Amino acid sequence: MLAQLGFEKNCALTPARTALVFEGRRISYEQLNRSCNRLARALRNAGVRRGDRVAIYLPNSIAAVIGIYAVLKAGATFVCINRSVKPAKLCYTLHDCGVVAMLTDPGACSPSTLSALRSAAPDLRTIVLDAAEEDTQAACPGALSMASIERTVPSDPLEPANIDLDLACLVYTSGSTGEPKGVMCDHSNVTFAMQSIVEYLGNTHDDIILCVLPLSYSYGLYQVLMAHAFGGTLVLQRSFAFPEETLRLIAEERVTGLPGVPPMFATLIKMDLSSFDLSSLRYATNAAAALPTPHIAEFRRKLPHVLFHSMYGLTETKRTLHLPPDQLDARIGSVGIAIPGTEVWIEGRDGRRLGPGETGELVVRGRHVMRGYWNAPAASAERFRPGPIPGERLCYTGDLFRVDADGYFYFVSRKDDIIKTRGEKVSPREVEDVLHAIPGVSQAAVVPMDDPVMGQVIRAVLVADRSIVTARAVLAHCHARLEEFMVPRVVEFRDALPTTSSGKVHRAAIAG
Amino acid sequence: MQLEQLIRTYLCENILYLDEDSDYSNDTSLIGEGLIDSMGVMDLVSFVRIEYHIDVDQRDITTDNFDSVSKIAAYIRRKSGCDSLLVQRSDSSARATWV
């Protein structure tokens, strides 16, 4: 089944139901579908074809949601890119996946950025701006305006162009090799993952989901796709920057589902929640990194009527494990069992399946195992390996787990150096590459540092010529090139860095 | 220096780390345009608390008060009871930095 079909089915069944709420605007399924059809037609008219990659470089917004479905309806593959990504990484991503079209806003269209994008992505022929015609032409002459498309392009449905083995989206994720990789998600992967998650969360069309997570992040993206697949309402917010507003929105919109990441819950449990009517909340989910057990306990103390789901996953399988809320007290620290319709186990270095009490790498089997990394066969072969049935893929997660006698899994550690901060994965290599580009820096190591709210933050340790390198200059350099969560919170200078016997920088020794 | 300019200078030097002031307007949505994220908001709240001795209530940390230079300036003026365009920082010394 195609990823957009659930949404389209609900557009036909309940056209008047509210599909999306954003900054006070309420959009029905029918309105949303018509806007998506218009943009899909505009993309096709501009030459976008089946399988082409289309970037969506927007903050959480109505336009971003329209963009996702429009690209799918046009038969293409969408690539959501966090709007806080800086031009150099944007260029890298657009080049890597060879985009032919991009949906963005006038703020992203400075002459220098446009020029860099055009040379990085020579196939980028079409730019669509979430703006009125006048503003569009002022920012990017020749671009298409979403406002004009909404006014002038017919909204009748398009014939589907795909089968479910075609790619629905690429989701870029950090890897230990440094450069982000695009996880190829075909329609059947996406649809299966959605159905499995909806099953264990028990979602129905009465659910109202609040999403403050960026849609560039699969956890955020699936909130959109799932809410519309089960016929519910999605309440979208730009971010969790203003927690009071989020709580007010939960109360006003009678939100039933709250997906979050550890820093959100760490913030919420410190707030006085008593002045908000949160009685509508049915469940909350945590993913991206483990929420400390005391935080779960405090959240449940403050909101005892809310079912709390601890979950674990990685972009390569979307979601992998979930802990049923009724097991929270009995399985402290566990992230649960395989999501419905899938199988997981742990393996030792020798490929042997391990039993209770042993620690090994978590291996995942199921239709949610994605198709590999775009344009990265070696990395794909490492992560996605043949399964027991010819043609099948298993995902080797790179995370070490143990399992108890009843089959519940417990995260132990990562096999690689990836740092989890603010719910995001950061490759130390990616940050170190940026640091090494600073004139005067001879060595750089990036290690995590514990933080009570963020989980971990980034610490940069440098060997540098102090006569020309200052901490402020390092931060300025990083800020111009990295997303906020990747920018070091601490910069430290040393005379030398410890090395391993093979001469590599010894990150573990630096991290202490 | 105008309050708005002081806020811009702070943003420029401590959050955006730019060598010179950027071309965003005082009404630009800092979150919407991706200039700052939730960490940046926390940083701006600390700036207002420390530099202007304003006890920022949790309930005041909203889009209406913190999502643009103009809104932050209006908030500071309202809370400090000062209508003047010229609001001096409480302390001219450099802000303690964590690096």
Image: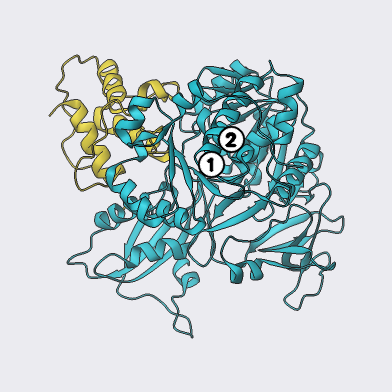
Chain colours: A cyan, B yellow
What is the CA distance from the residue labelled 2 to the residue labelled 1? 32 Å
Q: Chain of mark 1?
A: A
- Residue at screen point 44% across, 69% down: A510
Q: Amino acid at mark 1?
A: Pro
- Residue at screen point 48% across, 85% down: A502
- Residue at screen point 83% across, 64% down: A356
Q: Residues within 10 Å of mark 1 (few under 14, many from 20)?
A: many
Q: Is residue A305 left or right of residue B54?
A: right
Q: Amino acid at mark 2?
A: Ala
**Which quadrant of the view contains residue A32?**
top right
Q: Chain of mark 2?
A: A
Q: Quadrant of the N terminus of chain A?
A: top right
Look at the numbered disc 1 and give the secondary structure of its residue: helix
Please determine whether, in this image, residue A471 is positioned above or below residue A222.
Answer: below
- Residue at screen point 20% across, 16% down: B82
The spot of residue A373 in percent (x, y) is: 60, 61
Q: Which label is found at residue A263? A: 1
Q: Which residue is mark 2?
A: A70
Q: Is residue A274 left or right of residue B99?
A: right
Please determine whether, in this image, residue A326 is positioned above or below residue A276.
Answer: below
Q: Residue farthest to the bottom? A: A501
The spot of residue A149 in percent (x, y) is: 48, 27
Please determine whether, in this image, residue A257 is positioned above or below residue B19.
Answer: above
